């Protein structure tokens, strides 16, 4: 799976609502994202960890 800027993913918040993130950059082995629905903020994560979360179903591509 190739992670690219602009891709959006959904996930389930602790209260059961759906949250969305958008990839703001994918440089080297870091993936940066911002919350666009459900919460506010931004963060970054190791690319391999992000891919594991997608493969395990935590993040679902929108």
Image: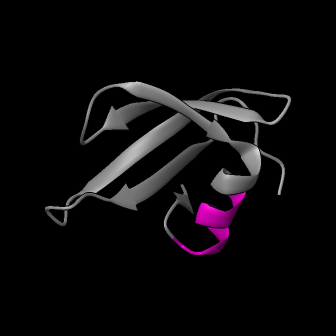
Name which quarter of the figure residue 52 lies in.
Answer: bottom right
For the N terminus, the quadrant is bottom right
Q: Position of residue 4 (x, y in %)?
A: 76, 36
Which colour scheme appears in the figure?
Answer: one colour
Side of 24 where 48 appears, left or right: right
Name the residue: 40% across, 45% down. Answer: 20
Q: Is residue 32 magenta?
A: no
What range is drawn magenta here? 51-57
Name which quarter of the figure residue 23 lies in.
Answer: top right
Establish if 53 lies above or below 42: below
| Residue ranking furthest to the bottom | 56
Side of 48 where 62 appears, left or right: left
Q: Where is residue 10 in the image (x, y as percent from the top left)?
A: 44, 55
Name the residue: 62% across, 64% down. Answer: 54
Front in this rendered view, residue 16 or 50: 50
Name which quarter of the figure residue 51 lies in.
Answer: bottom right
Side of 42 where 25 appears, left or right: right
How many numbered discs sit on the rendered protein? 0
Q: Where is residue 15 in the image (x, y as percent from the top left)?
A: 13, 62
Side of 31 where 20 appears, left or right: left
Establish if 46 lies above or below 35: below
Secondary structure mostly seen in the magenta stretch = helix
Name the residue: 43% across, 25% down. Answer: 42
Establish if 57 lies above or below 25: below
């Amino acid at each position: 799976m190739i992670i690219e800027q602009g891709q959006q993913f959904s996930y389930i918040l602790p209260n059961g609502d759906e949250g969305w993130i958008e990839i703001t950059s994918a440089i080297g082995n870091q993936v940066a994202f911002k919350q666009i629905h459900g919460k506010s903020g931004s963060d970054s994560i190791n690319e391999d960890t992000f891919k594991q979360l997608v493969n395990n179903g935590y993040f679902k591509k929108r």
